[in-house]
Image (tube, rainbow, N blue to C red):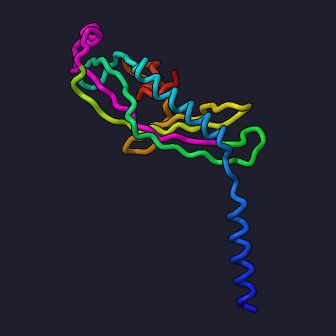
Amino acid sequence: MKTIKILIVSMLIIMASSFKATVPQDVITEFESMLKKHFATYKANPRGKVTKLAGGWVNERFVSVENHKYDIEKTGTPTTPYSGYCDFTLKRVMTEFHDTKKEAQQDVNFIKSDLTIHRHYYTFQKGKWEVSRRQYKTKEGWNDCNETIKNGENAGETNVKGCWED
């Protein structure tokens, strides 16, 4: 009797794994195409801006590092049948610190850099992929890419880590 139960459970597990939902190749291709276009925009538009940091004013740009990874899964809901995410790294290059915003605007000698990991989430709706959430990682955890600076000389600025869609 015990052997029969084990056999039945084993067969159910095998059958369940064979019914795993697969994502159609055209949906995967569309996702890959969208990501390729997104990363290409960093070459055409490095999201440059002048901003004030703790050390002073800097001119900064963002460069996509070629190390992204992604995954797509079937959701089971008719309105958003697939969801996906992409992890990628942006390299921020910046000038030396300046006393004034005008000095930083004129400086194009990018001498410092740092890296930020991003994760963007997508849903497939009405035949196309849409961004549903964008985050970047710090030592403290994941933060919203859409955050808005509330205080100081950069008050009102958004997308401070260079990840906005173009």
Residue 57 placed where, x, y %?
27, 17
Badge count: 0
Segment tinted magenta in the rendering: 83-109
- Side of 56 relative to 127 (left or right): left
| Farthest bottom residue in view | 1
Q: Nearer the viewer, residue 44 or 155?
A: 44
Q: Nearer the viewer, residue 102 or 148?
A: 102
Q: Quadrant of residue 126?
A: top right
Q: Nearer the viewer, residue 101 or 49?
A: 49
- Height in image: 99 above or below 71? above
Residue 145 placed where, x, y %?
49, 31
- Side of 48 relative to 166 (left or right): left
- Height in image: 148 above or below 86? above
Residue 16 placed where, x, y %?
72, 65
**Which residue sits at x=71%, y=89%?**
3
Residue 141 placed where, x, y %?
43, 45
- Height in image: 99 above or below 146? above
- Side of 25 relative to 147 (left or right): right
